[in-house]
Amino acid sequence: MDWRSFLNSLREDVFDWCQNKNWLIRLPFLIWFAYIFVRSLQDPMYGSVLSWLNLGIHELGHVVLMPFGLFIHVLGGTLFQLAAPIFSLFNFYRQDDYFSICLSFGWLSTSLFDTARYVSDARSLNLPLATIFGNDNPIHDWNYLLDKLHLLPFDLGISIFVKVLASIAMLTCLISGGWLLYLMANKPKIDEIRN
């Protein structure tokens, strides 16, 4: 199957999926993600409720990847934190739940904003660090990783790049989610849009 036929098939599936869905019960989720986006852009230290979920998954990543050496163990927190919303994207795609795919992009965005905040702290070391083992001297993940990769002087530039990715993910959530809500609210017009 080529990309054009895949996209046409996906478009038809989305139109069919929207036919029997209620847009009003989904709207608050997009409003909430729009609020998170604005707050994240205004305040680099802002953390939404999802930041706590992201932190828990981050710490789980450290534990799971501990046997694979210190570098992978330290990197594992961020890997798991970013992999969880990406996994949810594919999971909801398999279930043909297109609005939840949009929300997964919003979750990914919060995770990327949290990562950007952590990366920007790599040299200043001002953020309080969490550890599940009660270590008195925890490793600052991004200080360690960027130092090992000889990229520590570029921490702020890397952080800005991650914020751009976070913004792209959130805009994907809001624009595609808004489009789906429009289709749900305008069911009679779907046939016009299809043509």
Image (tube, helix red, strand yellow):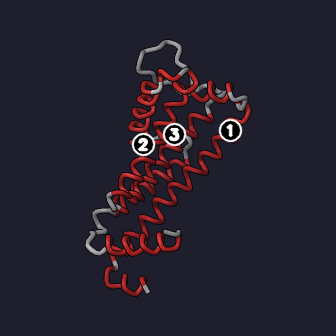
Residue type of the residue flagged with mark 2: Ala
| Residue 39 x %, y % | 50, 49
Q: Residue at x 45, y 53 (%)?
A: 106
Give the spatial CA distance, label 1 vs label 3. Answer: 14 Å
Q: Residue at x 47, y 46 (%)?
A: 110
Q: Is residue 3 left or right of residue 124?
A: left
Q: Is residue 169 above or below residue 191?
A: above
Q: Which residue is mark 1?
A: 156
Q: Residue at x 31, y 68 (%)?
A: 23
Residue sitting farthest toward the top: 136
**Mark 3, secondary structure of its residue:** helix
Residue 144: quadrant of the picture: top right
Give the spatial CA distance, label 2 vs label 1. Answer: 25 Å
Give the spatial CA distance, label 3 vs label 2. Answer: 14 Å
Q: Residue at x 41, y 53 (%)?
A: 90
Q: Which class describes the residues within 10 Å of circle 2: few (<14), some (14-19), or many (20+)?
A: some
Q: Is residue 195 above or below residue 23?
A: below
| Residue 28 x %, y % | 34, 59
Q: Which residue is mark 2?
A: 84
Give the mark nearest the N terminus, 1 or 3: 3
Q: Which residue is mark 3?
A: 114
Q: Is residue 185 above or below residue 78?
A: below
Q: Is residue 123 above or below residue 104?
A: above
Residue type of the residue flagged with mark 1: Leu
